[in-house]
Image (cartoon, rainbow, N blue to C red):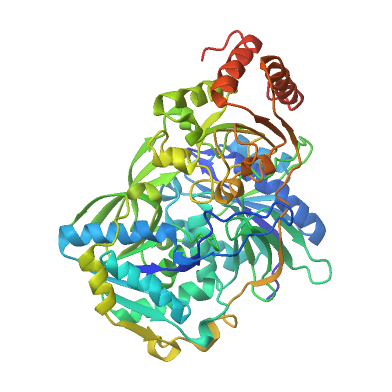
Amino acid sequence: MEYKGVWILGEQDEGRIKLVTLELLKRGRALADKRNVPLTAILLGEKIDAESLKKLGHYGADQVIVVEHPVLRYYLPEPYLNVCKVLIEKHHPEIMIASATTTGRSLMPALAVKCATGLTADCTELDIEEETGNLIQTRPAIGGNILATIKTPVHRPQMATVRPHSNKPLEPDPQRQAQIIYEKVDENLLGSRVKRIGFKANPAETASIQEADVVVAGGKGFKKAENFKMVHQLANLLNGAVGASRDAVDLGWAPYAAQVGLSGKTVSPKFYLAIGISGSVQHLAGIKTAEMIAAINNDPEAQIFQVTDFGIVADLFEVAPLLIEKLRNHLPDKEA
Amino acid sequence: MRIIVPIKQVPETTNVKMDPVTGTMVREGVEAIINPLDLYAIEAAAQLKEKFGSKIVTISMGPAKAEEALREAIAMGCDEAILLTDKAFAGADTWATSYTLAQAIRRIGEFDLILCGERATDGDTGQVGPGIAAWLDLPFATYVSKIESIQDGEIIVERMVENGYEMLSMPMPCLLTVVKEINYPRLPSLKGKIAAKQKQVAYWGTAEIGAQPNNIGLKGSPTRVVKIATPQVARFGKIVQPKDEHELNRALDELIDMLKQKAIL
């Protein structure tokens, strides 16, 4: 059996294509170019916006395989698993990557079992080994203390999930076109014992620390719940999301959804501002792929300063109000 | 109701200190503990036991030392413990691990629910839970933050996703991986501690679980770790220690300039 081509598993929400899809296309494009093979995006959904599907070509896809059905509107383990498996058995891709989102990290392990192949979780780097064509997968492990490089030497397709927002999409090229292929799947494969019977959206501000360009996070240095509102003010001024250390979440100052670190969420914003956070290893591992990190802490020995691009050793109760004031002056139309 | 809780013994990594010079983990005094995220699965099982009179079987794959983790799980309310230990299991990746655990679960027999921690803090993959579900063809949900109800063989749960919480229903038997938000794990009770000392931990190997030798351990693992490196954590950025308000003002202006350069402001 010849396995050929690079696949990315795209994601959509209410028919709109999610950013992680474009991020994966950039990763996939680099791998496909090295292997000199086409790059295919797989999209499952109910009614996916046709214009957006076309744009996947601009972002690097050569081909888009779309499967639409009402049961595929939201991720559900069984139909997604069955559809992906059937597509793999039909087309035999050599590599399939997905985003390490709640969908990717749920679907891919089950898919790897069903396809009898290897899967590497939450990769931060992917490359091709020239001599063999093997996918070289690099990921942090043991609380971010090591970087492991992993291969799937024999089994195909080689599968990996990629840390969301650990890279940006390609600049769109309107000249690039992708071939869009709608595939039908046997109805028998579309049953689901798991039913989605409701949804509660997060309040706008906590929308998603994983998708925000800016994350302002607070720790136990704030001393009291009411002081934590400064984190919200700063996040608002910077159009960012509010994050929190494990201590702050355990103290009830922020919801678990805001927890940054290995026991919470890993984030890769353009700018991460840590205030009153000493920086446990598990926290540092969760922010490593942020583009720029700044910290405010009164302890010069705080581990957070090991990973900062800019650190201010000072009392947060002096620094934060002043920073809020300065940002307000820069953005006079902002309320916070 | 019968609940199975697979757990893992891991090195205590959450409070690990990094050596700032070498950038490596300080290993002295690192103990082996129950994967912290498994405690939430054990607690969720213990709460169901109180409500429905369930029986909880905990299983773990690992060396003989992992028996400690199983005994701790008994102290928290598990009724039976099985250690999957065999030289042939060594070096397993998540594919082979989920196969091995699934085989053991088949051997245990009938059950209603499998509760797993969302991931282990050492490997940090979160792949074994969904893997077990795939081997056993079970309906499953990951990132479960709440068990809403169990009625007439149907379970309703809340699942934490990027932009909110999904409400899902599914028939049992099924598998759930749970996140921290689901509960506050209890400390072992005195009664539990006594039980933990007295109970037998069963030892099962390849033969007992009827595993295919080609599917277990390193031999059964599709992935290979080919290199371990120490990440460069330090960014060696600028650290300022303002002595007065003037210096603090200057530091914040510099930060704001950096944000402007990055087009964040």
Q: Disc count in the image? A: 0
Q: Nearer the viewer, residue B218 or A24?
A: B218
Q: Residue at x 39, y 79 (%)?
A: B83
Q: Residue at x 73, y 18 (%)?
A: B250
Q: Position of residue A269 (x, y in %)?
A: 63, 37
Q: Position of residue A186 (x, y in %)?
A: 46, 61
Residue B49, relative to residue A311: is it above or below? below
Q: Nearer the viewer, residue B161 or A93?
A: B161
Q: As drawn, is B172 to the left or to the right of A283?
A: left
Q: Is residue B152 visible?
A: no
Q: Residue at x 36, y 66 (%)?
A: B138
Q: Position of residue B104 (x, y in %)?
A: 38, 79
Q: Nearer the viewer, residue B18 or A270?
A: B18
* Farthest front residue in view: B243
Q: Position of residue B240 (x, y in %)?
A: 72, 29
Q: Nearer the viewer, residue B206 or A64?
A: B206
Q: As drawn, is A178 to the left or to the right of A197?
A: right
Q: Residue at x 40, y 51 (%)?
A: B179
Query: Where on the picture, by quarter, is residue B193?
Result: bottom left
Q: Is residue B222 visible?
A: yes
Q: Is the C terminus of chain B in the top left, top right, bottom left or bottom right quadrant?
A: top right
Q: Is the N terminus of chain B in the top left, top right, bottom left or bottom right quadrant?
A: bottom left
Residue A170, relative to residue A282: is it above or below? above
